Image (cartoon, helix red, strand yellow):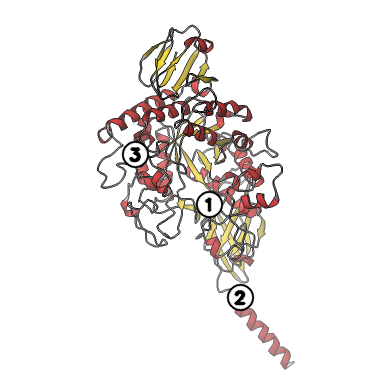
Amino acid sequence: MKHLLLALAAVAGITAQAAPARVNVDRIDPTCWYAGMKNPSVQLMVYGAGIKNADVSISYPGVTVDSLVRLDSPNYLLVYLNTSGAQPGIINIDFTLGKKKKTVPYELKQRDMAGDKRQGFTNEDVLYMLMPDRFADGDQSNNAVAGMQPYTTDRSKPSLRHGGDLAGIEQHLDYFTDLGVTALWFTPVLENDSPDGHGHSCYHGYATTDYYRVDPRFGTNADYRRLIDKSHERGLKVVMDMIFNHCGSYHPWLKDMPSHDWLNQPDYKDNYLQTSYKLTPVVDPYASEVDLRETVEGWFVPSMPDLNHHNVHVMNYLIQNSIWWIESAGIDGIRMDTYPYAYADAMARWMKTLNDEYPNFNVVGETWVENPYYTATWQKDSKLASENSNLKTVMDFSFYEKVDSAKHEETDGWWHGFNRVYNSLCQDYLYPDPSNVMAFIENHDTNRFLGNGHDMMTLKQALALLLTIKRIPQLYYGTEVLMNGTKEVTDGYVRKDFPGGFPGDERSAFTPEGRTYAQNDMYNWLKTVLHWRQGNKVITEGRMTQFIPVNGIYVIARRHEGKTVLTIVNGADQPATMPVKRYEEVIGTATTARDVPTGTTIDLTQDLTLPARATLILEY
């Protein structure tokens, strides 16, 4: 009996020792949720030391605990709630471990509007892409934020942080409306708390370490929401750049992995797999398993761990995050980075979820292959795809590559110069909806269109085509003031600081007085075309007709309800003649036309002679 009592006492001692001192709930993602969603289910990722084995209870009308998922790590617990019929309010969630209990208030918020009221970007818009770190520094107090991983703000180093922020963008909203763009796309603004290394930093924003927090060097979540509200007051939409494919290597998940299959290649320290960067295996009907695996499971770079979207809980986390930013910040669209690098079926599920909740919202996916057949495969309802991607908008890398090549070539009678653009647009039959394809002539990952030069003639040609073809146009910051640069040394040289956006700048390209004569020429030309394009149904709804280049001249017509626009570019380095009779099917009985950028009247009764690399945008 004595031995039995001793044994029981020992067990009791062990039990008492193992009993938790308290219930730890350090964080819950999402930080709040919204009542009245079409999908009533919400996943709460609860983080706290030893929280895995907690029991969870809720007493709130319309909210029930559907399930608990206990992951491999002892410090995570997934709580799936059903909020069907629940009204906004504070939900008290009870977490119990043994005899210890902790009650955590969780807010179910009122939505600003129903999902079908949110209008995304369309071909009526012109997107202006910018990098917050390189556009304008409106708040110098956030250039050195305590508590972050070691970093330096140094404008003399192209790959370090320069100090641009959300306040700088907000202070120049009137610049965008004056220019005439209608939507702003910022490269990612979420926290990238990784240390500098070897002269490089994560100023670009593509190595997320917190999916629910704006990087404090850019501002706060409240600053982001205010910037979006003020943009909306001026008729500007805001597109958020997101990355599902990977996170940053300093994300807390890397220190405490929720489950063994949270990442692709979870044993990366001993068995690292690099992506091949070759995207064709995703659509190749004959693709080998190894090729496909290297594409979608290989890491983009060692500092960007590849997330496993076939883990349903990972994908639920990411899907909810995108919804949370739509609801909490009021964004008008999403640009999804490295789209084909993630599992196609998981991304299709994400897009279906968003389309169901927000039928008028829009997402553009980065699909970097320069063949239209590839890009078209990714667009929603494509007959080329084995599974519907549900992705409404794709990026036209073919147009970018062809127009970039054309500037270096003479347009001949067959393949060179603007024949490349013509042949690319010939393949629009592949797209379910060409009007929902985003075109551009440069971005943050390419050389600037101007390279290291200042050839305004070819730049105007590229922009004239971009802004009048059947596409959603995207501009890159600074093009309007002739910013140039190439990637030969580092990407930082195509991501230079906008002149006048930073303290100490000698001049400001934000004002006519601060711009050079050439910069004002370019700015005013583009401003005129952008304002003319706003609300112009000939461009957004009109039928498009293109003509094979003849005599080096390439012509595209847009027609709608008796109105016509002709975009005419001379792709030769010498004057060329346009035989008017050849284009009588679109000119009709018109005898004169107005050149949009200059206001000049053009006689259509006789052949037109265009100077070398000249551009006309005629309307009649």
- Residue on which disc 2 sits: 19
- Residue 124 placed where, x, y %? 49, 28
Which sits in the foreground, 90 or 134? 134
Q: Which mark, residue 545?
A: none
- Residue 349 placed where, x, y %? 65, 44
One can see residue 60 in this view: no
For the N terminus, which image quadrant? bottom right
Quadrant in the rendering for residue 9: bottom right
How many numbered callouts?
3
User: Going by the picture, which residue comes out furthest to the right?
Assistant: 1
* Mark 2, secondary structure of its residue: loop
- Residue on which disc 3 sits: 172
Q: Kindly report the distance in space between the C-alpha atoms of the residues bearing marks 3 and 1.
A: 31 Å
Q: Is residue 319 left or right of residue 513?
A: right
Who comes first in sequence, dot 3 or dot 2?
Answer: 2
* Mark 3, secondary structure of its residue: loop
**Which amino acid does the dot numbered 3 rest on?**
His
- Residue on which disc 1 sits: 32
**Which amino acid does the dot numbered 1 rest on?**
Cys
Q: Is residue 375 left or right of residue 442?
A: right
Quadrant in the rendering for residue 268: bottom right
